[in-house]
Image (tube, helix red, strand yellow):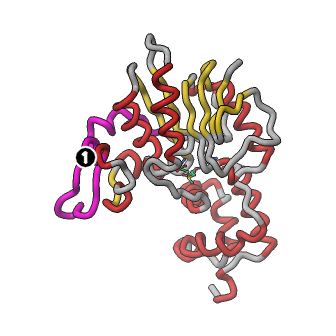
Amino acid sequence: MSTLETLPSEEVYTLFQKLVYDKLGIHLAKQKRMMLGHRLLKRVKHSQVNGFSDYFRFITNPDNSNELEVALELMTTNETFFFREEKHFEYLANAILPKINPNREYKVWSAASSSGEEPYSIAMLLNEHCPTPWSVVASDVNKSVLAHARKGIYIDDRTKLLPKKYRQTYCVKGTDEFEGYMRVKPELRKRLHFFYFNLLDNMASLGKFDLIFIRNVMIYFDDKTRQKIINGLQKCLNKDGYLFISHSETLHGLEHSFELIKPAIYQRTS
Ligand SMILES: C[S@@+](CC[C@H](N)C(=O)[O-])C[C@H]1O[C@@H](n2cnc3c(N)ncnc32)[C@H](O)[C@@H]1O
């Protein structure tokens, strides 16, 4: 491949944009062409095809669905950390949990969980503060980050964001080849269920939740996709249930029946 082909042409980039939009709902802006080239170049070389145009043809051939999956995973941004946007966690502990129905299980869904830091943070907090039995399920469209989440092994530095008490109670230090890593203890790990789910798909089979975290993912979608997802989420929330979006996101401009309770916190009141 010549050095000129470290970037897809504008025409080929349009094909990738449509593919990523159709499969993941992710809207790749015009100026992301360099990012796409950068993320996919290794795969273009690895697949031994002659540039981005051929790579596009390769991954859209049904015989190469594994490579399509790899390419799509490379289009997702998986940045996350423990207790990210801690105001949500404070609100959950101080305002929501003290008032929940004492007669049934409290159910939470982390709807774009990435490598697991978000759902493990939720689970640690529930284990400390939830007065009823609880469950946390977590999903993502990227199978590699889900595998990471199930293992629950994190570079030590990243777990420093955990409150000290939680770190001591719920994590163990790695030894030998795991020196420098922390692992979420099995007692907590086994309480979570991680599963593949594409937010573009029908949510009806997922059941109902009391709280849904859908944070730092809708920024990648356009209004049409956001609206479709919000329609689905409304049906997945129990009455009085809460929806947490990121503080950098908004439901402004979308039709919904949630009540805005606080910045980035919505409730299904009807
Ligand atoms: C930036 S991470 C957010 C992680 C976590 N919610 C947080 O706020 O820290 C965004 C995640 O959304 C996932 N994602 C992107 N498109 C998706 C889709 N269509 N369905 C489900 N997950 C998707 C990505 O794989 C990625 O792991």
Residue at image location 49% in from the left, 19% down from the top: 100
Does the magenta portion include 185? Answer: yes
Residue 159 relative to residue 174: left or right: right
Label 1 CB less than 8 angstroms from ligand 1 = no
Which of these two is toward me, 227 or 33?
227
Quarter where residue 19 is shown? bottom right
- Describe residue 104's horizontal placement relative to residue 58 as left or right: left
Q: Position of residue 222 (x, y in %)?
A: 77, 50
Q: Is residue 23 visible?
A: no
Magenta residues, start to end? 167-195
Q: Looking at the image, which residue is at 42% across and 42% down?
A: 121
Q: Position of residue 116 (x, y in %)?
A: 44, 47
Question: Is residue 20 rendered magenta in the image?
Answer: no
Position of 101 relative to 235 (above/below): above
Q: Which residue is mark 1?
A: 168
- Extreme residue in the bottom direction: 3
Crowding near pointer 1: few (<14 within 10 Å), some, many (20+)? Answer: few
Looking at the figure, which quarter contains the C terminus? top right
Give the total number of marks visible in the rendering: 1
Residue 196 in sight from this viewpoint? yes
Kind of residue sitting beneath label 1: Gln
Residue most extreme to the left: 176
Q: 22 or 131, which lies in front? A: 131
Residue at 27% over, 35% down = 187
**Quarter of the image where one finds residue 263:** top right
